[in-house]
Image (cartoon, rainbow, N blue to C red):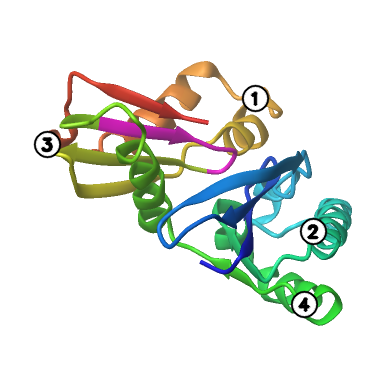
């Protein structure tokens, strides 16, 4: 890790940034954390995942503010990842190029299984030891699950269940509740039996 590293996570609902400073070869500490409710996925699910101009402008302005903080704190490295909203968006490459050209921030879009894996890594490294557990991360566009056995991540899965996705596809259109439940049940059927665990860890 560089002396100071900024890590940015662009989700469907919010964009978050944490800045860490290395204190030793294997040690580091958090020196700053912030987030912005950009709602980059807002309105996208009614248009095949196409990100809308207003939402993209909010996201760009948030990243612009992040860049100002990064410069003021003299960060040596920036890692930026994006998840469900940009994964699903046909116009994501245009936004990614704009951010890179204007702000010098390279956005890496990660798939759902990698997102689930990173969440589980965070859970495993929490002070309390985890031998057997299931992590669940409910986001705006998707939900990620990771199965931990004997302190090791053995499997991950990503489901198309998210708060923004369900709101726009079902609740905003006042679609009957039984159809919403059927959609959710269909996604839940994809979870393998070996994901069953007595310990559930929620990630927010």
| Residue 190 appears in view | no
Q: On screen, 60 above or below 33? A: below
Q: Nearer the viewer, mark 2 or mark 1?
A: 2
Q: Which of marks 2 and 4 is nearer the N terminus?
A: 2
For label 1, the crowd category at 10 Å Cα-Cα, with few meaning under 14, some 14 to 19 and many 20 or more, is some
Residue beneath disc 2: 73
* Discs 2, 1 touching: Cβ within 8 Å: no
Q: Earlier in the sequence, mark 3 or mark 4?
A: 4
Q: Which of marks 3 and 2 is in front?
A: 2
Q: On screen, 156 above or below 89? A: above
Image disc number at residue 171: 1
Residue 134 in percent (x, y) is at 26, 31
For label 2, the crowd category at 10 Å Cα-Cα, with few meaning under 14, some 14 to 19 and many 20 or more, is some
Q: Nearer the viewer, residue 62 or 161?
A: 62
The span from disc 2 to disc 4 (Cα, nearest Å) is 16 Å
Q: Which of marks 3 and 2 is nearer the N terminus?
A: 2
Q: Which of 77 and 29 is in front in this view?
A: 29
The span from disc 1 to disc 4 (Cα, nearest Å) is 38 Å
Range covered by the magenta-colored residues: 134-141
**Which residue corresponds to the image point at 40% horizontal and 51% vertical from the top-left?**
118
């Amino acid at each position: 890790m560089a002396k100071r590293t900024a890590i940015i996570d662009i989700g469907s609902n919010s964009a978050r940034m944490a800045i860490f400073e290395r204190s030793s070869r294997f040690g580091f500490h958090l020196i700053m954390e912030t987030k912005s409710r950009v709602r980059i996925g807002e309105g996208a699910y009614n248009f095949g995942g196409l990100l809308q101009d207003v939402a993209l402008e909010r996201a760009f302005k948030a990243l612009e503010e992040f860049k100002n903080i990064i410069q003021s704190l003299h960060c040596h490295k920036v890692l930026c990842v994006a998840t469900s909203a940009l994964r699903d968006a046909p116009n994501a490459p245009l936004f990614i190029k704009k951010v890179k050209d204007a702000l010098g921030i390279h956005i890496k879009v990660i798939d759902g299984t990698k997102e689930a894996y990173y969440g589980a890594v965070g859970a495993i490294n929490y002070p309390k030891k985890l031998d057997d557990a299931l992590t669940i991360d409910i986001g705006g566009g998707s939900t990620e699950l990771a199965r931990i056995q004997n302190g090791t991540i053995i499997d991950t899965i990503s489901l198309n269940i998210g708060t923004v996705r369900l709101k726009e596809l079902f609740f905003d259109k006042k679609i009957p509740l039984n159809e919403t439940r059927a959609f959710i049940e269909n996604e839940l059927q994809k979870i393998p039996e070996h994901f069953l665990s007595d310990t559930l860890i929620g990630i927010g």
